[in-house]
Image (cartoon, rainbow, N blue to C red):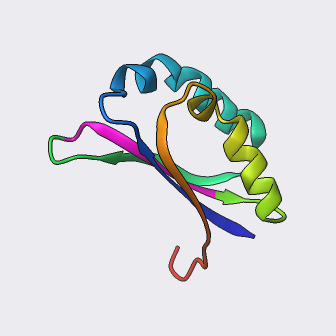
């Protein structure tokens, strides 16, 4: 099951993102369930959120992954949505 995780950072939280980026990327690699991922950017190309496509068994697994992401544990996000996603192209 593909799940799109769309997260928006808290305002002014770029330092939290930068401080936890290595741990976040290591988590992505270690868990092996991320199909695609990358930061959301503002008009000045500053990172302001995340888009992660998870390939998991169910929504509970997606929620567990999201809860254990180092970014989430560091309190980076203002909001997080988990939405079932259907790959049509790619």
* Most foreground residue, 78 or 39: 78
Residue pictured at 59% horizontal, 35% vertical? 72
Nearer-the-camera pick, 68 or 87: 68
Height in image: 86 above or below 21? Answer: below
Occupied quadrant, residue 16: top left
* Residue 36, percent from left and from top: 56, 54
Q: Going by the image, does 26 lie left or right of 36?
A: right
Residue extending furthest toward the bottom: 88
Q: Which percent across, then down, holds residue 20?
A: 52, 21
Residue occupying the point 65% across, 35% down: 69
Q: Residue at x 54, y 83 (%)?
A: 88
Residue in the image at 73% along x and 52% along y: 63
Please say whether residue 3 is one of the residues in the magenta stretch: no
Which quadrant of the figure contains the N terminus? Answer: bottom right
Q: Which residues are magenta?
A: 45-53
Q: Residue 22, percent across and down?
A: 55, 21
Determine the residue located farthest toward the left in the rendered image.
Answer: 44
Which sits in the foreground, 33 or 16? 16
- x, y (%) of residue 4? 58, 63
Q: How many marks?
A: 0
Q: Within the image, what quadrant is residue 53 found in?
A: bottom right
Secondary structure mainly formed by the magenta segment: strand
Depicted 80 relative to depicted 14: above or below: below
Residue 73 location, quadrant = top right
């Amino acid at each position: 099951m593909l799940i799109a995780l769309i997260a928006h950072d808290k305002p002014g939280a770029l330092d939290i993102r930068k401080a936890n980026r290595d741990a976040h990327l290591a988590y992505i690699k270690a868990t092996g369930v991320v199909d695609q991922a990358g930061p959301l950017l503002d008009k000045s190309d500053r990172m302001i959120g995340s888009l992660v496509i998870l390939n998991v068994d169910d929504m509970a697994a997606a929620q567990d992954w999201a809860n254990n992401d180092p970014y989430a544990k560091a309190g980076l996000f203002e909001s997080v949505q988990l939405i079932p996603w259907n790959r049509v192209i790619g």
